[in-house]
Amino acid sequence: GAGVSQTPSNKVTEKGKYVELRCDPISGHTALYWYRQSLGQGPEFLIYFQGTGAADDSGLPNDRFFAVRPEGSVSTLKIQRTERGDSAVYLCASTTRGGRDTGELFFGEGSRLTVL
Amino acid sequence: TQLLEQSPQFLSIQEGENLTVYCNSSSVFSSLQWYRQEPGEGPVLLVTVVTGGEVKKLKRLTFQFGDARKDSSLHITAAQPGDTGLYLCAGAGSSNTGKLIFGQGTTLQVKP
Protein backbone atom coordinates (compact mmCIF):
# COMPACT_ATOMS: atom_id res chain seq x y z
CA GLY A 1 0.00 0.00 0.00
CA ALA A 2 0.90 3.68 0.04
CA GLY A 3 1.20 4.02 3.81
CA VAL A 4 4.12 3.67 6.21
CA SER A 5 5.19 0.05 6.39
CA GLN A 6 6.89 -1.49 9.44
CA THR A 7 8.40 -4.93 9.77
CA PRO A 8 8.24 -7.17 11.62
CA SER A 9 4.81 -6.54 13.07
CA ASN A 10 5.70 -8.75 16.03
CA LYS A 11 9.08 -9.74 17.40
CA VAL A 12 9.72 -11.96 20.40
CA THR A 13 13.30 -12.21 21.55
CA GLU A 14 15.32 -13.22 24.57
CA LYS A 15 17.04 -10.87 26.95
CA GLY A 16 20.49 -9.95 25.66
CA LYS A 17 19.74 -10.49 21.98
CA TYR A 18 20.08 -7.97 19.15
CA VAL A 19 17.03 -6.82 17.16
CA GLU A 20 16.40 -4.70 14.10
CA LEU A 21 13.11 -3.00 13.30
CA ARG A 22 12.50 -1.64 9.82
CA CYS A 23 10.44 1.31 8.62
CA ASP A 24 9.55 2.03 5.01
CA PRO A 25 8.09 5.56 4.88
CA ILE A 26 5.68 7.04 2.38
CA SER A 27 7.50 7.73 -0.88
CA GLY A 28 8.78 11.30 -1.04
CA HIS A 29 8.57 11.96 2.69
CA THR A 30 11.88 13.43 3.78
CA ALA A 31 11.18 13.49 7.51
CA LEU A 32 11.00 10.28 9.54
CA TYR A 33 10.36 9.80 13.26
CA TRP A 34 10.64 6.84 15.61
CA TYR A 35 8.46 6.67 18.72
CA ARG A 36 8.07 4.03 21.42
CA GLN A 37 4.72 3.27 23.03
CA SER A 38 4.50 1.25 26.21
CA LEU A 39 1.26 -0.38 27.29
CA GLY A 40 -1.26 2.19 28.49
CA GLN A 41 0.94 5.13 27.55
CA GLY A 42 1.21 7.65 24.76
CA PRO A 43 4.05 7.44 22.24
CA GLU A 44 7.44 8.67 23.40
CA PHE A 45 9.81 10.35 20.95
CA LEU A 46 13.05 8.51 20.13
CA ILE A 47 14.72 10.01 17.06
CA TYR A 48 14.06 12.25 14.04
CA PHE A 49 15.65 12.00 10.61
CA GLN A 50 15.67 14.73 7.99
CA GLY A 51 16.91 12.97 4.89
CA THR A 52 19.82 10.72 5.77
CA GLY A 53 20.89 12.51 8.92
CA ALA A 54 19.64 12.16 12.47
CA ALA A 55 18.56 15.73 13.26
CA ASP A 56 17.46 14.93 16.81
CA ASP A 57 18.32 11.74 18.70
CA SER A 58 17.65 13.15 22.15
CA GLY A 59 14.94 10.58 22.85
CA LEU A 60 17.12 7.49 22.52
CA PRO A 61 17.18 6.04 26.06
CA ASN A 62 20.80 4.85 26.03
CA ASP A 63 23.61 3.74 23.75
CA ARG A 64 22.02 0.32 23.18
CA PHE A 65 19.65 2.07 20.79
CA PHE A 66 20.77 3.22 17.36
CA ALA A 67 18.99 4.11 14.14
CA VAL A 68 20.08 4.65 10.55
CA ARG A 69 18.59 5.92 7.33
CA PRO A 70 21.44 5.53 4.84
CA GLU A 71 19.62 6.48 1.65
CA GLY A 72 17.07 8.87 3.06
CA SER A 73 14.19 6.44 2.72
CA VAL A 74 14.06 3.17 4.70
CA SER A 75 15.14 3.43 8.31
CA THR A 76 16.27 0.71 10.72
CA LEU A 77 16.08 0.95 14.49
CA LYS A 78 18.68 -1.27 16.13
CA ILE A 79 18.60 -2.40 19.73
CA GLN A 80 21.59 -4.19 21.25
CA ARG A 81 21.59 -6.39 24.36
CA THR A 82 17.83 -6.16 24.72
CA GLU A 83 16.30 -5.88 28.18
CA ARG A 84 12.81 -6.73 29.37
CA GLY A 85 12.12 -3.02 29.78
CA ASP A 86 12.57 -2.55 26.03
CA SER A 87 9.29 -4.38 25.44
CA ALA A 88 6.93 -1.94 23.73
CA VAL A 89 5.41 -1.04 20.39
CA TYR A 90 7.88 0.86 18.23
CA LEU A 91 6.11 3.29 15.91
CA CYS A 92 7.52 4.94 12.83
CA ALA A 93 6.02 8.06 11.25
CA SER A 94 6.86 10.06 8.16
CA THR A 95 5.87 13.44 6.80
CA THR A 96 6.63 15.69 3.87
CA ARG A 97 8.57 18.15 5.96
CA GLY A 98 9.91 18.06 9.47
CA GLY A 99 11.19 20.73 11.75
CA ARG A 100 9.21 23.60 13.20
CA ASP A 101 6.56 23.50 10.47
CA THR A 102 6.03 19.76 10.55
CA GLY A 103 3.12 18.63 8.44
CA GLU A 104 0.75 15.80 9.28
CA LEU A 105 2.53 12.74 10.65
CA PHE A 106 1.56 9.42 9.08
CA PHE A 107 2.19 6.52 11.42
CA GLY A 108 2.81 2.90 10.61
CA GLU A 109 1.08 0.10 12.50
CA GLY A 110 4.12 -0.41 14.67
CA SER A 111 6.44 -3.27 15.56
CA ARG A 112 5.53 -4.97 18.82
CA LEU A 113 8.71 -6.07 20.60
CA THR A 114 8.56 -8.54 23.46
CA VAL A 115 11.74 -9.32 25.36
CA LEU A 116 11.50 -12.48 27.47
CA THR B 1 10.47 19.18 30.65
CA GLN B 2 7.23 19.59 28.74
CA LEU B 3 4.45 17.26 29.84
CA LEU B 4 0.84 16.78 28.79
CA GLU B 5 -1.67 15.33 31.24
CA GLN B 6 -4.86 13.83 29.87
CA SER B 7 -8.01 13.17 31.83
CA PRO B 8 -9.83 10.98 32.27
CA GLN B 9 -7.60 8.02 31.43
CA PHE B 10 -10.58 5.70 30.92
CA LEU B 11 -14.15 6.45 29.95
CA SER B 12 -16.97 3.99 29.39
CA ILE B 13 -20.29 5.46 28.27
CA GLN B 14 -23.51 4.52 26.54
CA GLU B 15 -24.23 5.33 22.93
CA GLY B 16 -25.77 8.79 22.61
CA GLU B 17 -24.03 10.35 25.59
CA ASN B 18 -21.74 13.37 25.41
CA LEU B 19 -18.20 13.45 26.77
CA THR B 20 -15.20 15.73 27.14
CA VAL B 21 -11.52 14.79 27.29
CA TYR B 22 -9.01 17.23 28.70
CA CYS B 23 -5.36 17.78 27.91
CA ASN B 24 -3.42 20.05 30.27
CA SER B 25 0.11 21.33 30.63
CA SER B 26 2.08 23.99 32.46
CA SER B 27 4.00 24.62 29.24
CA VAL B 28 3.04 26.65 26.19
CA PHE B 29 2.83 24.76 22.91
CA SER B 30 3.07 26.30 19.45
CA SER B 31 0.43 23.86 18.26
CA LEU B 32 -1.49 20.91 19.57
CA GLN B 33 -2.79 17.85 17.76
CA TRP B 34 -5.38 15.23 18.59
CA TYR B 35 -4.99 11.66 17.36
CA ARG B 36 -7.17 8.57 17.53
CA GLN B 37 -5.58 5.14 17.77
CA GLU B 38 -7.25 1.75 17.39
CA PRO B 39 -5.74 -1.52 18.68
CA GLY B 40 -2.90 -2.77 16.50
CA GLU B 41 -2.72 0.41 14.48
CA GLY B 42 -0.77 3.65 14.57
CA PRO B 43 -2.30 6.97 15.65
CA VAL B 44 -4.29 8.85 13.01
CA LEU B 45 -4.42 12.64 13.06
CA LEU B 46 -7.84 14.17 13.75
CA VAL B 47 -7.03 17.87 14.00
CA THR B 48 -4.32 20.45 14.59
CA VAL B 49 -5.00 23.64 16.54
CA VAL B 50 -2.54 26.51 16.39
CA THR B 51 -4.10 29.72 17.66
CA GLY B 52 -4.99 30.35 21.31
CA GLY B 53 -8.77 30.13 21.75
CA GLU B 54 -9.20 28.31 18.45
CA VAL B 55 -12.19 26.01 18.06
CA LYS B 56 -12.41 23.39 15.33
CA LYS B 57 -15.27 21.04 14.56
CA LEU B 58 -15.08 17.68 12.87
CA LYS B 59 -18.64 16.31 12.56
CA ARG B 60 -19.59 15.44 16.16
CA LEU B 61 -16.14 16.26 17.55
CA THR B 62 -15.28 19.74 18.81
CA PHE B 63 -11.69 20.66 19.63
CA GLN B 64 -10.61 23.73 21.56
CA PHE B 65 -7.16 25.19 22.21
CA GLY B 66 -6.83 27.20 25.41
CA ASP B 67 -6.25 30.94 25.21
CA ALA B 68 -2.78 30.55 26.70
CA ARG B 69 -1.99 27.54 24.45
CA LYS B 70 -1.34 25.34 27.47
CA ASP B 71 -4.43 23.17 27.35
CA SER B 72 -6.97 21.69 25.00
CA SER B 73 -10.23 19.78 25.09
CA LEU B 74 -12.05 17.33 22.87
CA HIS B 75 -15.83 17.16 23.14
CA ILE B 76 -17.83 14.41 21.47
CA THR B 77 -21.56 14.85 21.03
CA ALA B 78 -23.88 11.83 20.86
CA ALA B 79 -21.08 9.27 21.01
CA GLN B 80 -21.35 6.18 18.83
CA PRO B 81 -19.71 2.74 19.17
CA GLY B 82 -17.49 3.66 16.23
CA ASP B 83 -15.92 6.39 18.38
CA THR B 84 -14.36 3.72 20.60
CA GLY B 85 -10.58 4.00 20.71
CA LEU B 86 -7.58 5.66 22.33
CA TYR B 87 -7.53 9.45 22.03
CA LEU B 88 -4.15 11.14 22.28
CA CYS B 89 -3.24 14.79 22.49
CA ALA B 90 0.21 15.83 21.33
CA GLY B 91 2.00 19.15 21.53
CA ALA B 92 4.78 20.41 19.32
CA GLY B 93 7.86 20.52 21.55
CA SER B 94 10.06 23.52 22.17
CA SER B 95 12.75 22.25 19.80
CA ASN B 96 12.76 22.99 16.08
CA THR B 97 12.64 19.34 15.11
CA GLY B 98 8.88 18.88 15.06
CA LYS B 99 8.97 16.13 17.66
CA LEU B 100 5.68 15.67 19.49
CA ILE B 101 5.08 15.38 23.22
CA PHE B 102 2.16 13.00 23.72
CA GLY B 103 -0.23 12.73 26.60
CA GLN B 104 -0.81 9.28 28.10
CA GLY B 105 -4.09 8.93 26.25
CA THR B 106 -7.77 8.50 27.06
CA THR B 107 -9.33 5.12 26.35
CA LEU B 108 -12.95 5.58 25.29
CA GLN B 109 -15.45 2.77 25.14
CA VAL B 110 -18.90 3.50 23.76
CA LYS B 111 -21.42 0.75 24.44
CA PRO B 112 -24.34 0.20 22.06
Image (tube, coloured by chain):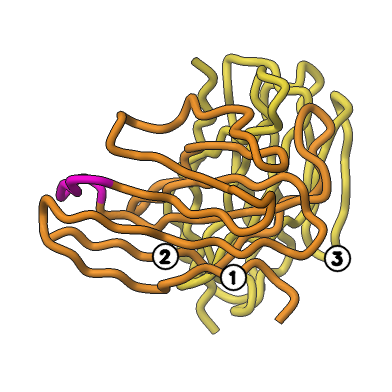
Chain colours: A orange, B yellow
- The image shows residue A106, relative to residue A84, as above or below, that is below
Q: Secondary structure at mark 2?
A: strand
* Amino acid type assigned to the residue bearing label 2 in the image: Ser
Q: Position of residue B97 (x, y in %)?
A: 69, 28
Report if residue B8 is visible in the image: no
**Which quarter shows the N terminus of chain A?**
bottom right
Secondary element at tag 1? strand
Earlier-in-chain disc, 1 versus 2: 1
Residue B49 is inside the magenta segment: no
Q: Residue at x 35, y 50 (%)?
A: A38
> Residue at label 2?
A111
Task: Kindly identify the residue that appears in the image at 41 percent across and 32 percent down.
Answer: A60
Question: Is disc 3 in the same subunit as disc 1?
Answer: no
Disc 3 to disc 1, how far (Cα)?
A: 30 Å
Magenta stretch bounds: A80-86
Q: Residue at x 17, y 46 (%)?
A: A81
In the rendered image, residue B51, in percent from the top left (x then y), is placed at 88, 27
Chain letter of the residue beneath label 1 in the structure image:
A
Between residues B51 and B42, which one lies in front from this camera angle? B42
Residue B59 disc label:
3
The image shows residue A100 at horizontal and vertical percentages of 79, 27
The circle drawn on residue A5 is 1
Residue A88 visible? The answer is: yes
What chain does mark 2 sit on?
A: A
Whether residue B92 sits left or right of residue A112 in the image: it is: right
Q: Chain of mark 3?
A: B
How many numbered tags mark residues here?
3
Q: How far apart are the two marked residues, 1 and 2, measured between alpha carbons?
A: 10 Å
- How many angstroms separate mark 2 from mark 3 (CA)? 32 Å
Identify which residue is drawn at 51% across, 24% down.
B3
Secondary element under disc 3, as helix, strand or loop, is: loop
